[in-house]
Amino acid sequence: MTNNPTRCDIFCTVIDNYGDAAVCWRLARQLADEYGWRMRLWIDDLAPLQRLAPDYAASPVEVQPWPTPWLATEPADVVIEAFGCELPPIYVDAMAARSQPPVWVNLEYLSAERWVAGCHGLPSPHPRLPLVKHFFFPGFSDGTGGLLRERDYDARCKAFDETAFRTEFGLPAKLPDELTISLFSYENPALPELLRAWADAERPIRLLRPGNSEAAWIRGNLSVHPLPFLPQTRYDELLWACDLNFVRGEESFVRAQWAAKSFVWHIYPQADDAHRAKLDAFLDIHPAGAQLKAFWHAWNGVGTPDWPDFAARLPGLEEASQQWAITLAARPDLASRLVQFCLERLK
Ligand code: TRH
């Protein structure tokens, strides 16, 4: 290797959601900003990226619409195939034609299941070409690929001005007993019941709904405020501004953990209920898993959410969330593990 910056191509296909683009964008930014890698992101749909990072064109990451048919392109030193999206065959041929084949990584979905550590880093030789793809599994434990977390996360969190945030979005000053909640979820049949419980709650509840265009409304002790869909960096601010965050999928789920606030996870539903094992695997490793279980199961379709019971647990949950964030932040983050993994193979 020369001293030239490592060049890296990330390939991402978007599945009718934000998560895949969100992970790829965050990783691309971090590798460019913190490691000086020359990043190119090939993405088949720019729409989610435009919402997550409206200023993407001004960033150090070169964003390229995935052309069909593919146009001949010089492959990078590191090639990240996100979530098993298939690389263009011509690009793969060009990878094999390089004197030193690129480090080829298949970035997988996050799961807390035990098998993840056993599969992280495994090689998968190409059946025909002199290329090896490696599985890179994000995860919570030491034997996995870790979690995305930027170096400046703590500094940004410390500098956050909650009052200014509330003013900017037209929210009144926080009432002494107010519980501020953010809600980002899939269609959820448990929501109407929960809204009723919040209207009847003992303390005032302010519900913030990013990316929701309904008008603001008040019922009983519940005030509901739509917010615009926030750029990815500002979504962290929303999590910091709330006492309880309802999150979903993979990316907002991870950000809620860094925010160190109580949270409720709506897991991405999969065929054959495969997501249930994933949900329970996370509850098993979280220090407050036993406390969260009934409410999280109900939010994910098993049972009815018991708000008064969950609300009574919140003070203990907050402490556990803080502990959990400290434990996770002490482990190396995903980008640093990925860089080490690739550089070892580029030597
Ligand atoms: O969009 P998602 O449902 O993504 C999902 C999951 O990633 C899942 O694993 C995958 O298989 C499926 O897509 C196809 O939820 P997720 O992962 O939380 O991604 C949402 C991103 O959007 C996250 O980075 C937070 C960000 N966001 C904002 O930036 N601003 C906002 O206002 C909101 C509500 C979200």
Image (spheres, helix red, strand yellow):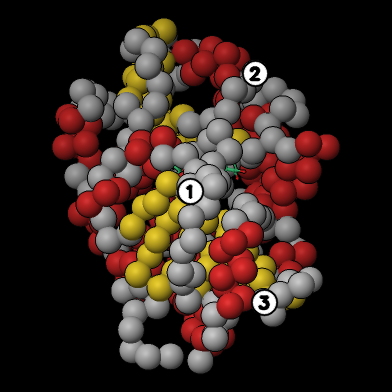
Residue type, label 3: Leu
- Relative to residue 297, is residue 73 depicted above or below? below
Q: Give the residue displayed 73% in from the left and 42% down from the top.
A: 275
Q: Give the residue displayed 62% in from the left and 52% down from the top.
A: 85
The residue that label 2 is drawn on is: 189
Please provide percent x and percent y for residue 79: 53, 68
Dividing the picture into quadrants, the one containing residue 96 is bottom right
Mark 1–mark 2 distance (CA, rounded to whole Å): 36 Å
Please provide percent x and percent y for residue 282: 67, 52
Tag 3 and tag 1, C-beta contact below 8 Å: no
* Chain-order first, disc 3 or disc 1: 1
Q: Nearer the viewer, mark 2 or mark 3?
A: 3
* Chain-order first, disc 2 or disc 3: 3
Please provide percent x and percent y for residue 60: 27, 61
Outermost residue to the right: 272
The residue that label 3 is drawn on is: 131
Q: Mark on residue 213?
A: none
- Asked whether 154 or 346 is in front, the reply is 346
Mark 2: C-beta under 8 Å from nearest atom of ligand 1: no
Q: Residues within 10 Å of mark 3 (few under 14, many from 20)?
A: many
Q: Give the residue displayed 23% in from the left and 40% down from the top.
A: 162
- Relative to residue 71, is residue 205 depicted above or below? above
The residue that label 1 is drawn on is: 66
**Residue 249 vs residue 237: left or right?**
right
* Chain-order first, disc 1 or disc 2: 1
Mark 3–mark 1 distance (CA, rounded to whole Å): 22 Å
